[in-house]
Image: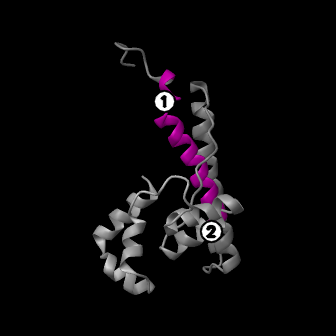
């Protein structure tokens, strides 16, 4: 979805007038954000500008900050890996190992019935690693990289 389409959809949930008032901007500017961009013109809506800042800096902390402000967190998609079907078992083992590692960090942190900020930070790091490994696996499944493991047609093993 393009940025202007996202903004247009968001303006269906709340009014452009409310957004303009909240941001102390003109109503026409807010409506302009929801229009397709003019080719070769500088970015005119805030989403495109944020994208430009991220592209310029290469720093994902901007996205992390935005996600945190919205009550979530940012998980970067894994680099495209295309494991062959015979890598399914090692891939599932990797997920299980990452989960076990996360549980070990949680258990160590909770052993004294309290979790301090440093321990919480370690838990977050392990959680992010687990999500990345799992996302890689799911994307491989979605792209059909494990199709070779299906039994041949007519073989219902």
What percent of the width, then of the height, locates residue 52?
61, 61
Q: Is 38 one of the magenta-colored residues?
A: no
The residue where tag 1 is placed is: 144
CA distance separating discs 2 and 1: 33 Å
Q: Nearer the viewer, residue 38 or 147?
A: 38
What percent of the width, then of the height, locates residue 141?
49, 35
Q: Image point 63% across, 35% down: which residue? A: 90
**Number of numbered discs on residues:** 2
What percent of the width, then of the height, locates residue 31?
36, 70
Q: Secondary structure at mark 1?
A: loop
Badge 1: residue crowd in 10 Å (few <14, some 14–19, many ≥20): few
Which of the image's four quarters has the C terminus?
top left
115 to 3, vertically: above or below: below
Range of magenta residues:
124-148
Q: Secondary structure at mark 2?
A: helix
Which label number is shown at residue 17?
Answer: none
The residue where tag 2 is placed is: 62
Q: How is the image coloured?
A: one colour
88 to 77, vertically: above or below: above
Q: Image point 48% across, 25% down: which residue? A: 147
Q: Image point 62% across, 39% down: which residue? A: 80
In the shown orientation, is residue 3 left or right of residue 136?
Answer: left
Q: Nearer the viewer, mark 2 or mark 1?
A: 2
Q: Is 143 one of the magenta-colored residues?
A: yes
Q: Earlier in the sequence, mark 2 or mark 1?
A: 2
What percent of the width, then of the height, locates residue 69?
52, 76
Q: Image point 56% across, 26% down: which residue? A: 85
């Amino acid at each position: 979805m393009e940025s202007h389409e996202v903004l247009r959809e968001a303006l269906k949930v709340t009014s452009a007038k409310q957004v303009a008032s909240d941001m102390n901007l003109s109503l026409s500017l807010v409506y302009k954000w929801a229009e397709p961009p003019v080719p070769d013109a500088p970015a005119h809506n805030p989403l495109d500008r944020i994208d430009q800042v991220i592209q310029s800096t290469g720093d994902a902390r901007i996205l992390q900050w935005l996600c945190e402000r919205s009550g979530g967190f940012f998980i970067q998609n894994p680099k495209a890996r295309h494991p062959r079907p015979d890598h399914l078992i090692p891939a599932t083992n990797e997920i299980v190992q990452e989960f076990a590692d996360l549980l070990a960090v949680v258990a160590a942190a909770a052993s004294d019935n309290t979790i301090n900020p440093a321990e919480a930070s370690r838990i977050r790091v392990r959680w992010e690693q687990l999500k990345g490994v799992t996302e890689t696996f799911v994307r491989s499944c979605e792209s059909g990289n494990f199709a070779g493991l299906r039994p041949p047609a007519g073989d219902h093993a």
